[in-house]
Structures are given as structure tokens and as C-alpha cells.
Amino acid sequence: MMLDQLSQLFRPVGFFWRTNRHSPKALSLAAVIVTIMLLLLFKFTQPQPPVKVQQEKAWLVQTQQLVAGSTSPQLELYGRVESPYTATITSSITADIKSLDVREGQHVTKGQLLILLDDIDVQLVLEDKRSNVAELEALIKSENNRYKNDLVSLKLEKSLVTLAEKKLAREEKTSKTNLTSQSSFDSQKQALQNQKLALNARKLSVTDHPARLAQLEARLSRNRALALQAQHDLQRATVVAPFDGIILSIMVSPGERVRPGEVLLETYATGQVELRALLPQKFVAIIKQSLANEIPLPAKLQTDATESVVFLSRISGLITDGGHGVDALFVINNEAAEELTIDDMTIGETLELTLFLPPVENAYSLPVSSIYGTNRIYRVEDERLVAVKVKKLGSQYINDNQFVLVSSEKLKAGDEIIITQLPHALSGLKVEVHNAVIPQNNSEQQSSSELR
């Protein structure tokens, strides 16, 4: 068969050679034609290589099955230790420091002696004020006696005026009959006028009694107040602790002379220690509603020594300067407060705490690696990826691993969600599931319920 094809192929060449073999160029041209024909023959007769069918690549992924139930979102916050009961104790008097009975960092109880001031100067001022009070009390007593005397004397002065008027009338009758001299009449008339002046003066003294008494009583009240102030200053010479607390700093030493308003020491109440943490703005509304409904919001506080539970007490009414949220204030029990420190006035160490929000329904906990972009996850259906847009409700922290709470109407319990980050994930991509054991949030939900 092959020979027949070759004979048919080279038959025109043989014919060309027989007719043109005497030509000088016939041999060269025949060689070229034969070469071309041989090349064409080899090309069309060579065997075809087998065609390999391209198979679709399947990407290896891990998945997590969605579990239905009520889930509590968590917020990881950083709280600053502070105390609203931080007292800066100052001197109220000018005095020398007689003794210093506490040291920085020392625990004190309410009413405990802190500093004793020399009170000799204050005692002298107090004695002066008390003497002024005694003097004014005596003046008031004298004024009352004077008033009683004026009332009695007023009646006598009126009687004397009446007698003088009668005597003058008699003198006037006798002077008309020339029985008395004109000078005697004038003397009697002058005596009546003097008596009337004395009566008017007595009336004025009686009338002015309430005003004089009021002035004395006002001066007495003022000096009593000054004496009371001096008494308080004398008591302030003994500086005592206003509450149970810890001494932050001491600004004076024995022998120093202090003046009113000069700082002696600083202390804060151990029973009023709080944590101030910044709440993200998106969670403020749900926390306000929980506080209004008296739903307890516990938080796990982690310190270097122990782990304790604190509760959200209230949130600030002001938005922070950056506008990223508001401050939340957590109440700390006395035992935990003993382990905390306040360094600078009301600002202390910064601690990490995890706040448990109210449980939400139809929410699913997924690892952070399952989130693509900002709000997209992928579900596995028939070995293919299907993109699902979700709403993020918060986070969870389990064994130092962060999980994200998501919800969507397109999700249901039992769905397989990939938790592997693929470089080119898209709907329809073929995948092959190879699951490994991953932490679940059941133990965390149990710990959340115990906190509540």
C-alpha cells in the first residue's frame, strides 16, 4: 500500500526526467522537487501525538460546620485604672509640721492620723476670738440692763416734766401780780426746757435700744463664727484619712512650715477604684439598652497575678476627642483593687479585659481566616464555592484565638464554611475539603454563662 502511494507520488517526477533529461538544469531541478516531495511526505505520514485532556484543579481547603444557638459577642478592651475618690489634702492653717505618721504606698483606714501640725498659733487665735465673744455677750447684757433702766427713768422724766410745767404755771401767775421777780420766772422756764430735753434724750435712748442691740448681736454672731472657724482650724491641725485608701505621695517633712492651701499629701480610696475603657461607637447603643434594662454586663479582667470578673457600671455621656466612641466605667471589687496601682493622680496601669455582650440569636462563630474582604464568606456546595455576604456582630476570643460572629438570612446550621484563605477565591471554584480539628465556642459560651 505504501509502495503504491510512493509510485503515484513520484510518477510526475519520472515523466519530467524522461522529457527533460538532456537539459543541463534538469538534474538540479529534479533533485529539488524530489527533496520537497520527500519533506511533504514525511510531514503528512508522521504519527500524531496523543491529546491529553486538561483536568480542572481542585484547591485544598478546611471547613467549619455552622452550629445553631445563642452566642454572646465579646469586646476586647484596654482599661485604665483610676479612682474618682482621689484626695489632695492641703493645709488649712499656717503651722509647722510636728509629726508625719504615714509613708508613701501605705494603706490607711478612715480617721487614721496622717500628719500632726503644731497648733500653738491657732490656739492663740481661738482664745482671742473667744474673748471677743465673751466681751460682746457682756455688752449685750449691759445694753439690756440699760434698756430696763431707761424704761424706769422715762416714767420719772415724764413726772419731772409735769412738775416743772406746774411750777412754771405758778410762777407765771405770781409774776403777773409782781409777787416774784422776772428772773425767777425765767429760771423756772429754763428748768422746764432742760427737763424736756432730758425726757427727749431718754426717749431716744429707749427708741435706739433695738438698733444698738442688733449691732451688738451682729458683732457677737461674727465673732462666734470666727471662734468656730478657729476651733475648726485647731481640729485641722490633726490631719486624718478621709477614707480607707492608699497614700499616693507625700509633699512635706517634719519641721517644715506650711501655709493655707499648700499640698500635704495625696491619697485615693481603695473602695472606689474603677476601670475606664473606650467603647467602639457601634456597640454604644446595645450597651445603653442593656444598662437601661438592668442586664448585667460582666467582663473578664486579666492581671499579672490573677483573673477576676468586673461589671460595667455606666458609660460616659461625652464622646471622646477622637470621636471613635465613649468611655465605659467598670466597678472593681476591693480584693481586686488591692492588686492594682494608680501612678499619677487618677491615672494608673492599663489592663486587658474582655467584655461579654448580651447573647444574640441566629449568629455563628467563625475564625477570622474565613472572612474575605469585609463581609464575605464562602460556603461549600457540591465541591464548589458559593459566596455569601454576612453582617459582622462582634468577636469572640477563645484560647487566645479570635473568632468573628456573623449572621445572614442565607446561612443555616450545618452549612460548611471554608476557613482557609485562598488567593483567588470566587464563586464556582472547585475545592477539596481536608478538615482538621479546630476549636469551637461551646466552652466559651459555658464560661460566659458562668460569668452571668
Image (tube, rainbow, N blue to C red):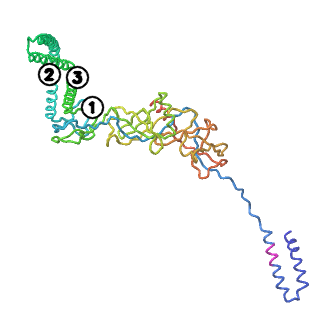
Q: What label does residue 231 carry, if any?
A: none
Circle 3 SS class: helix
Residue denoted by label 2: 138
| Residue 145 falls in image quadrant | top left
**Of 29 and 373, the residue lying toward us:** 373
**Mark nearer the N terminus (3 vs 2):** 2
Q: Which residues are magenta?
A: 35-40
Residue denoted by label 3: 211
Q: Residues within 10 Å of mark 1 (few under 14, many from 20)?
A: some
- Type of the residue with mark 1: Pro
**Of 239 and 9, the residue lying toward us:** 239
Tell which tag, 1 or 3, sits nearer the viewer.
3
Query: In the picture shown, does residue 231 fall above or below 29?
Result: above
Circle 1 SS class: loop
Residue denoted by label 1: 242
Circle 2 SS class: helix
Q: How many labels, in total?
A: 3
Q: Residues within 10 Å of mark 2 (few under 14, many from 20)?
A: few
Q: Residues within 10 Å of mark 3 (few under 14, many from 20)?
A: few
Tell which tag, 2 or 1, sits nearer the viewer.
2
